């Protein structure tokens, strides 16, 4: 077996297939990588019926890490090539042992790919996590099912509902990985495959393992307690995650995997996902001069606080749509005056400095969901009572650009504005 592409390399080392994700910067599981993985699995499956079949598989990543997972920008687009769920299931159902050798990060879809392997070894500094809940999603490739099978209901829900990556020692304690390797990781993974093969141990799929589910009553009681805890939580993905973990107990593995996949697809169509993904990217694009990281939290800088004060001017005491309209109007003036480059920067600042809900996406994102036209129509009435609702030229120009205020700004269609 020998393959060398732009996204993976695959070769046979002493009778053991080695598949290496190799797509900078994060070994992302994009369409090309999934296609290449599918082709590598085709070769392995075909070779199982030959005179010298492979004895096992080592799955690893180049560039100092395993994989950062799927491209978040394309999650809600039609899937090109094999989807990750199908790739994971094929890996899991291989009749020869598959060992994932993890280094750096195994995040999101990367963690789901690792969970589909029969065994996992990790370098000491590896971080593993399923942060899907932060985007309003349950896992989409069976990660919740396999996590529950390996770690049990309580630990799985802690990891899935918090969404924060865990260190290799914490992952080992939870049962998420099988060992931490101080020496050469690939050599250790290769040795483990050789030992398993020599012992004639037939691998079992992770999904469907029942050891952690022996006490079904306690499993359901845990789910009941968690449902009480999130009863008033606005984030709908938490309930979807709980339902998926209940499916792990009550349904056969194939049906439980389909249930989780359906829950993921439902969440992709939820406005909460679009808002959370938008804020995620806004936080990463905003200049550090406006929003800084302090102790793991995003905090407006002095310049950012000045912008927030200008953004909120005139909206004090207002609520609902009136507050939204006042802030959007003032934000349009700040954009036109060159005080800030993008409306998304103002949204990120509003989330972290004005208490705007992440689930709304920020004032400009929320206004686009309503439609700038509907908001402007109301502002024209309210401006008779309060000049804060005067419609700025940039906002009117956005109406002619499919509600894209940033496109209107780039095209210079706004006239002179009052900066407030």
Image (tube, rainbow, N blue to C red):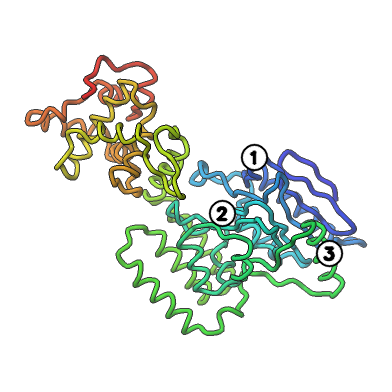
Q: Which residue is labeled 2 in the image?
A: 108
Is label 2 or label 1 in front? Answer: 1
Count of labels in the image: 3
The residue tagged 3 is 191
Disc 3 or 2, which lies upstream in sequence?
2
In the rendered image of this protein, does residue 124 appear above or below residue 275? below
Tag 3–tag 2 contact (CB < 8 Å): no
The image position of residue 155, as x and y in percent, is 52, 71
Q: Which residue is mark 1?
A: 25
SS category of the residue bearing label 1:
loop
Residue in view at x 78 percent, y 59 percent: 183
Task: Check the image and name the residue furthest to the right.
Answer: 51
Residue at 60% from the left image edge and 78% from the top image edge: 210
Q: Is residue 38 above or below residue 336?
A: below
Quadrant of the image containing the C terminus: top left
Q: Is residue 72 above or below residue 199?
A: above
Specify few, some or many for label 2: CA neighbours under 10 Å numbering under 14, 14-19, or 20 or more. Answer: many
The residue closer to the viewer here, 255 or 165, is: 165
- Residue 409 figure quarter: top left
Q: Viewer-proximal residue, 135 or 247?
A: 135
How far apart are the alpha carbons under marks 2 and 1?
16 Å
Say which label, 2 or 1, has the lower sequence index: 1
């Amino acid at each position: 077996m020998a393959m060398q592409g732009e996204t993976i390399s695959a070769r046979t080392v002493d009778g053991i297939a080695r598949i290496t994700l190799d797509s900078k910067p994060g070994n992302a599981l994009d369409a090309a990588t999934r296609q290449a993985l599918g082709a590598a699995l085709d070769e392995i499956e075909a070779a199982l019926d030959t005179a010298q079949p492979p004895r096992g598989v080592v799955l690893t990543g180049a560039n100092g890490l395993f994989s950062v997972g799927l491209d978040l920008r394309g999650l809600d687009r039609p899937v090109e090539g094999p989807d990750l769920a199908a790739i994971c299931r094929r890996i899991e159902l291989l009749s020869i042992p598959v060992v994932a050798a993890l280094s750096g990060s195994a995040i999101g879809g990367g963690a789901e790919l690792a969970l589909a392997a029969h065994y996992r070894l990790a370098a000491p500094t590896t971080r593993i996590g399923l942060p899907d809940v932060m985007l309003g999603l349950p896992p989409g490739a069976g990660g919740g099912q396999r996590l529950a099978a390996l770690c049990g209901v309580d630990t799985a829900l802690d990891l899935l509902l918090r969404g924060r990556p865990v260190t290799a020692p914490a992952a080992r304690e939870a049962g998420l990985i099988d060992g931490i390797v101080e020496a050469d990781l690939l050599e250790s993974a290769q040795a483990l495959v050789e030992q398993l093969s020599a012992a004639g141990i037939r691998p079992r799929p992770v999904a469907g393992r029942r050891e952690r589910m022996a006490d079904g009553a306690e499993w359901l009681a845990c789910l009941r307690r968690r449902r009480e805890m999130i009863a008033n939580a606005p984030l709908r993905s938490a309930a979807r995650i709980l339902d998926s973990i209940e499916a792990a107990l009550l349904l056969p593995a194939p049906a439980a995997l389909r249930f989780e996949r359906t829950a993921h697809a439902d969440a992709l169509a939820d406005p909460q996902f679009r808002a959370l993904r938008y804020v995620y990217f806004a936080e990463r694009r905003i200049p550090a001069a406006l929003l800084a990281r302090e102790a793991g939290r995003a905090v407006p800088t002095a310049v950012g606080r000045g912008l927030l004060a200008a953004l909120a001017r005139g909206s004090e005491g207002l609520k609902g749509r009136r507050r939204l309209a006042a802030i959007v109007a003032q934000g349009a003036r700040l954009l036109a005056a060159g005080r800030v480059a993008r409306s998304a920067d103002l949204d990120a600042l509003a989330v972290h400095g004005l208490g705007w809900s992440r689930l709304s996406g920020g004032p400009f994102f929320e206004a686009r969901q309503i439609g700038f036209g509907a908001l402007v129509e109301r502002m024209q009435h309210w401006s008779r009572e309060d000049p804060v609702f005067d419609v700025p030229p940039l906002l009117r120009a956005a109406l002619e650009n499919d509600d894209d205020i940033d496109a209107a700004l780039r095209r210079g269609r706004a006239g002179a504005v009052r900066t407030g």
